[in-house]
Image (cartoon, grey):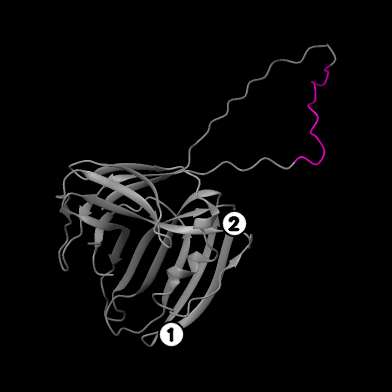
């Protein structure tokens, strides 16, 4: 991945503060309050749908061997969240002339637009055979989504990623850490795990997943760590985990 990316923030969930107060105990005997009976056989309450708020400013990615992105120059437009497999538009929001936007993903997605084991697709770039992830809720369905930016002059997907390369030493090549953010919708709570190794261009790739999905929208991070120099030896690792707040977003794929 040689095009890098926008400054944005993923704000996931809300915080709740509960205050408690109490009074003194008197000589009067304490009596239990009324108890509301629970009808037998009543199903447990459905978990609330988790929303995901994304905001930031789109940039044009930096050119190779340069250190600065280019400010947005596409004018006012629209940001749309799209399910990757079915290409279904889910929600959209306005994009300002300076590239700023805020999108609140809070809609339910119909099960017909979801699939099983879709997160395994994130590992196929390095291990084309992919691998079967283990789900605590095998009946749950999910779908990855991506953001698209569109204005009068630009129509592209957005990539949420950070890349850091450490300095090489006499005994070790430079180490690259690449983090890429993903958005996914799940129709139920689910824990997804898995581990495997494969060979990619004569290098060992160790892949692992440890993700807890809630019902609704989730933010995930795929992290690649390995030697950054072409032909360098050493093990590479790819991990999928819960995560948020990658600080760069940018256009990267021309759709027209």
Q: Which quadrant holds residue 161?
A: bottom left
Q: What stretch is highlighted in magenta?
A: 30-42
Choose the circle earlier in sequence order: 2 or 1.
Answer: 2
Disc sitting over residue 61 in the figure: none
Q: In this view, does 194 lie above or below 79?
A: below
Task: Identify which residue is drawn at 29% across, 45% down.
Answer: 56
Task: Identify which residue is drawn at 57% across, 41% down.
Answer: 48
Left or right: 55 as drawn, with respect to 129: left
- In this view of the protein, can residue 5 be seen by the observer? no
Left or right: 250 as drawn, with respect to 140: left
Category of crowding for the residue at label 2, using alpha-carbon neighbours closer than 10 angstroms: few (below 14), some (14–19), many (at least 20): many
Disc sitting over residue 190 in the figure: 2
Q: Is residue 239 above or below residue 150?
A: below
Name the residue beneath numbered marker 1: 199
Image coords of residue 20 (percent x, y): 62, 24
Left or right: 106 as drawn, with respect to 189: left
| Residue 156 part of the magenta segment | no
Left or right: 132 as drawn, with respect to 146: right
Element type where label 1 sits in the image: strand
Image coords of residue 11 (percent x, y): 40, 44
* Cβ atoms under marks 2 and 1 closer than 8 Å: no
Task: Identify which residue is drawn at 44% across, 54% down.
Answer: 243
Element type where label 2 sits in the image: strand
Category of crowding for the residue at label 1, using alpha-carbon neighbours closer than 10 angstroms: few (below 14), some (14–19), many (at least 20): few
Classified by dominant secondary structure, the portion drawn in magenta counts as loop
């Amino acid at each position: 991945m040689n095009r890098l990316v926008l400054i944005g923030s993923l704000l996931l969930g809300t915080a709740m503060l509960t205050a408690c107060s109490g009074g003194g105990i008197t000589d009067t005997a304490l009596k239990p309050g009324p108890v509301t009976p629970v009808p037998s056989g009543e199903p447990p309450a459905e978990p609330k749908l988790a929303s995901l708020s994304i905001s930031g400013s789109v940039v044009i990615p930096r050119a190779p061997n340069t250190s600065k992105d280019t400010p947005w120059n596409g004018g006012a437009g629209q940001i749309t969240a799209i399910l990757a497999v079915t290409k279904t538009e889910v929600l959209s929001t306005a994009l300002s002339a300076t590239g700023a936007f805020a999108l609140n993903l809070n809609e339910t997605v119909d099960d017909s637009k979801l699939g099983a084991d879709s997160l395994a697709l994130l590992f196929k770039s390095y291990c084309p055979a992919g691998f079967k992830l283990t789900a605590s809720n095998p009946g749950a369905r999910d779908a990855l989504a991506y953001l698209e930016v569109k204005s009068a002059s630009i129509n592209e997907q957005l990539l949420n990623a950070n890349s850091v390369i450490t300095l090489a030493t006499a005994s070790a090549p430079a180490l690259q850490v690449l983090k890429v953010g993903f958005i996914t919708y799940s129709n139920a709570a689910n824990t997804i795990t898995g581990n495997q190794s494969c060979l990619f261009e004569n290098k060992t790739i160790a892949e692992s997943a440890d993700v807890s999905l809630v019902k609704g929208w989730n933010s995930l991070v795929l992290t690649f760590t390995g030697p950054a120099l072409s032909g360098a030896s050493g093990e590479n690792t790819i991990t999928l985990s819960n995560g948020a707040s990658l600080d760069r977003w940018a256009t990267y794929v021309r759709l027209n």
